Image (cartoon, rainbow, N blue to C red):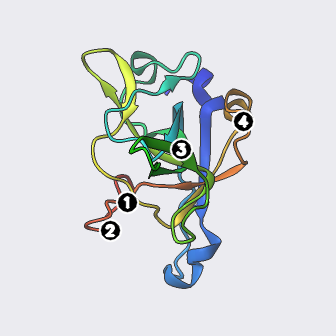
Amino acid sequence: MPAELNRWVASLRPDPRYLTYQPDTPGTRAQVLIVGQHAAFATPPTGGTPLATFPGVTPAAVGSGCAVMGLVRVEYATRVDTTDADGILHSRWEDGTFAHLPHGIGWRLVPAQPDPTSNRWVIATGRWAAGSRQALLPRAVLREAPGAPATVAVHDHNPHTGRPAMA
C-alpha cells in the first residue's frame, strides 16, 4: 500500500462489550484501509452500493492484499402509513416508534470491494453483522465524515455462519 494512503488507515481493537467472550490470547494489531463512505436512510445499504471515495483512494491506487472497508452512516427511521376517513393514504417517517428497533444515527465499517465495471469502491457483496472489534477512525476520515464518532463497530461477520470476512 502506498505511504500516502496511511492517513486513511484505522486500527482495530477488541470491542469491550465482547471481552468476556473472546479468548485470552493476545491479539495482533490489525488495521484496515477506509476507502470511502455512504449515508443511508431508514435501513443499512446492501452489497454493491457505491461508496463516496475518499481523495486518492481509488482501486488502482490501493492495489491488492489490503483489507478495505467503507464507513456507513445509517439514519434509522420507521415508515408509518395511515389512512384518513376519506381513504387517502398518508406516509411519514418516525424515529423511535418501536423500542426494539434501532433508532437515531448509527455508524459502522463494512467490507468494501472494487466494482470492475465502474472502477469505484462498493460495499462488498453479502450481509454483514457486527463482529467483536471496533475501529479507531483516523483524523482524515473524521474530517471527511462530519459527525462520525472516533470509534465505530466493525461489521465484518457473516450473520449466517458467524465467520469473519477478513482476518
- Measuring 48% from the left and 43% from the top, which residue is drawn there? 91
Q: Residues within 10 Å of mark 4 (few under 14, many from 20)?
A: some
Percent position of residue 26, x then y: 56, 72
Percent position of residue 112, x then y: 40, 37
Of the two numbered discs 1 and 3 on the same chain, state the one appearing first in sequence.
Answer: 3
Q: CA distance from mark 1 to mark 3?
A: 33 Å
Percent position of residue 155, x then y: 46, 55
Of the two numbered discs 1 and 4 on the same chain, state the one appearing first in sequence.
Answer: 4
Q: Which of labels 2 and 3 is toward the front?
A: 3
Of the two numbered discs 3 and 4 on the same chain, state the one appearing first in sequence.
Answer: 3
The secondary element bearing badge 3 is classed as: strand
The secondary element bearing badge 4 is classed as: helix
Callout 2–callout 3 Cβ contact below 8 Å: no
Asked if residue 76 shows in the view, the reply is: no
Callout 1–callout 4 Cβ contact below 8 Å: no
Q: Which mark is residue 142?
A: 4
Callout 1–callout 3 Cβ contact below 8 Å: no
The secondary element bearing badge 1 is classed as: loop
Which residue position is annotated with label 1?
Answer: 157
